[in-house]
Amino acid sequence: MRLSVLQSNLARGLSIVSRAVESRPSMPVLSNVLLKTEESRLKLAAVNMSLGLGITVWIGANVEVDGSVTLPAKVFVDLVNNLSNDRVDLSLDTTTQTVHLRCGGNKGNIKGIDAHEFPPLNEGSGSDLTVEGGLFKNMINQVGFSAAADDHRPALTGIFMQLNGSTITMAAADGYRLAVHTGELEQKFDKALNLLIPARSLQEVAKVITEDDEPVYINLPGERDIIVFTVGQVEISAQLLDAKFPPFESVIPKDYSTSTVMYRTDLLAACQRAEIFARDSAFSGRLYVKPPRRSGDPGEVTIVGKSQERGDNEGLLDATVEGEPVDISFNIKYLIDVLRVLPDEEVVLQSKGAANPGVIRPVGRDNYLYVIMPMAR
């Protein structure tokens, strides 16, 4: 193998694929990145067997001799990131599996492992579905944070994706909150298709979408339950979770007794101040919602965070309140999480009292909702 690439292109490609490298691999080759020439391009790939995640990136290259090798990801990434912004020449000594690197006045040698030891890649073939990049990225970002971080309940570590008719739905939950986002597709599915995709894998897809009008091509799962996403020159494969996502529709409250409209940025700032003190009380933040005393007056929302050791903070917001007063406690971090990912100017909090879940929706659109369970006092 002998080729040359631009340092900036190589560094960008490695920054993407290295996110799939296992920190504690079961085999030494899984801590490596695959380099393989392919149709006058250089293919970079990494696989995380424990997560069922694979990432492949193609970058332009001047290929003189075809070949392949795997190199230790951390060493290769660190070296490339510290090279000058110049042409990088790579050549492989197949007898020792050593790559000789030259860039400007720098020369280096990196010892690798034969590419034949690298696991086979799950690559896409054609496209079963195309989704607008901006829509897909927003859906992932606005539900993915609600997925469970630990694997005690494997189904909750994934994002549920349903394709039904011309509607795409994503949902994620961790037992304390639920986020649901719907969107419209140009294609139509006669029969509902339900998929449970690891949240980590979909979040990697969102990271590589850079333009709203950039298409995401999706190869739907076959016999091996592998789904493949292609965005530009990046391909991400994910192993579907072998679990059943709970019927989330039953968690969504059907009615409410109080509706409170607030400016999102004001509410976020108040929650962030309360969170400073709520850390000492399992992040419990208290919301007092008061309807207006007289017609034409604004309602009020008070957000309180308390710490027995460090003090407390109370923030007062004007709000449009309809219905009954509410005194309810939520995990303040969960409120901050959703308010950070929503771009909307105003949000509405719907509640049916302190013992029932609250629902946050953006004002002016009905394709998103966030259910949050109350905390006991």
Image (cartoon, rainbow, N blue to C red):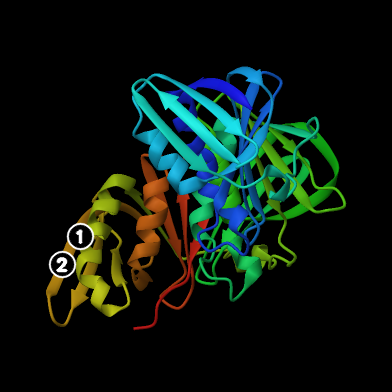
Q: Amino acid at mark 2?
A: Asn
Tell me, yes or no, if residue 363 can be seen here. Answer: no
In contact (CB < 8 Å): disc 2 and disc 1: yes
Residue 273 has which mark?
1
Q: Is residue 131 above or below residue 62?
A: below
Label 1: element kind: helix
Residue in the picture at 30% in, 67% down: 287
Q: Look at the image and tell me in which quarter the C terminus lies.
A: bottom left
Left or right: 362 as drawn, with respect to 290: right
Q: Is residue 187 left or right of residue 223?
A: left
Question: What is the number of the mark on residue 227?
Answer: none
Looking at the picture, which amino acid does disc 1 mark? Answer: Arg
Frontmost residue, 18 versus 83: 83
State which tag comes first along the sequence, 2 or 1.
Answer: 1
- Of residue 106 and residue 225, the one placed in the foreground of this image is 106
The quarter of the displayed image where residue 33 is located: top right
**Residue drawn at (18%, 77%) of the image:** 307
Judging by the rendered image, the residue that carries numbered circle 2 is 313
Rate crowding at label 1 as few (under 14), some (14 to 19) or many (20 or more) other CA atoms within 10 Å.
some
Left or right: where does residue 311 sit relative to residue 295?
Answer: left
Q: In x, y percent, where is residue 250?
A: 66, 68
Residue at image location 22% in from the left, 68% down from the top: 304
Calculate the distance from the C-alpha at mark 2 to the C-alpha at mark 1: 7 Å
